[in-house]
Image (tube, grey):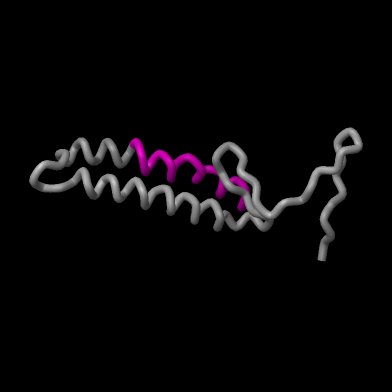
Amino acid sequence: MHLDPNIRIRNSPIPVVNEIRFLGVIFDRKLTFLPHVLHLRKKCEKSLNILKVLSKTSWGADRASLLRIYQAVILSRIDYGCMVLPVLLS
């Protein structure tokens, strides 16, 4: 078992934390990305609810517009942090 490191910058200690958000990606202590995935899921579920409202058959948006909204709002969030995981696992 490894103890937490004692890191200092100009005699100011840097605390060890369980989670940190850096450039929109949440890194946890063991690099499991579970907090990031859970946060991403919660944000995407809210956006999916908006898409459900916009997709009503009587007055909603057409298929091409819904696809563009999905790509801009949901897929962009999923794609943003996905490149970090393979780099850390190798």
* Residue 90 visible here: no
Q: Residue furthest left?
A: 58
68 up-or-down from 52: above or below: above
Q: Residue furthest top?
A: 10
Residue at image point 58% right, 47% down: 26
Left or right for 52, reference 72? left
In the image, residue 66 lies at what x, y percent? 23, 40
Q: Position of residue 8 (x, y in %)?
A: 87, 40
User: In the rendering, at what x and y percent does residue 74 appear?
Assistant: 37, 43
Q: Quadrant of the N terminus?
A: bottom right
Q: Is residue 13 visible?
A: yes
Q: Which residues are magenta?
A: 72-90
Main secondary structure found in the magenta portion:
helix
The picture quadrant where one finds residue 79 is top left
Asked where in the image residue 51 lies, by quadrant, the reply is top left
Residue occupying the point 36% across, 39% down: 73
User: In the image, is residue 15 part of the stretch drawn in magenta?
Assistant: no
In the image: residue 15, left or right of residue 42: right
40, above or below 9, in the image: below
Looking at the image, which residue sits at the far right?
11
Q: Nearer the viewer, residue 56 or 76?
A: 56
Tell me residue 56's x, y (percent).
Answer: 15, 47
Task: Classify residue 21 as left or right of residue 52.
Answer: right
Q: Is residue 79 magenta?
A: yes
Q: Nearer the viewer, residue 79 or 77?
A: 77
Tag count = 0
Of residues 87 and 44, which is closer to you in this image? 44
36 on left or right of 66: right
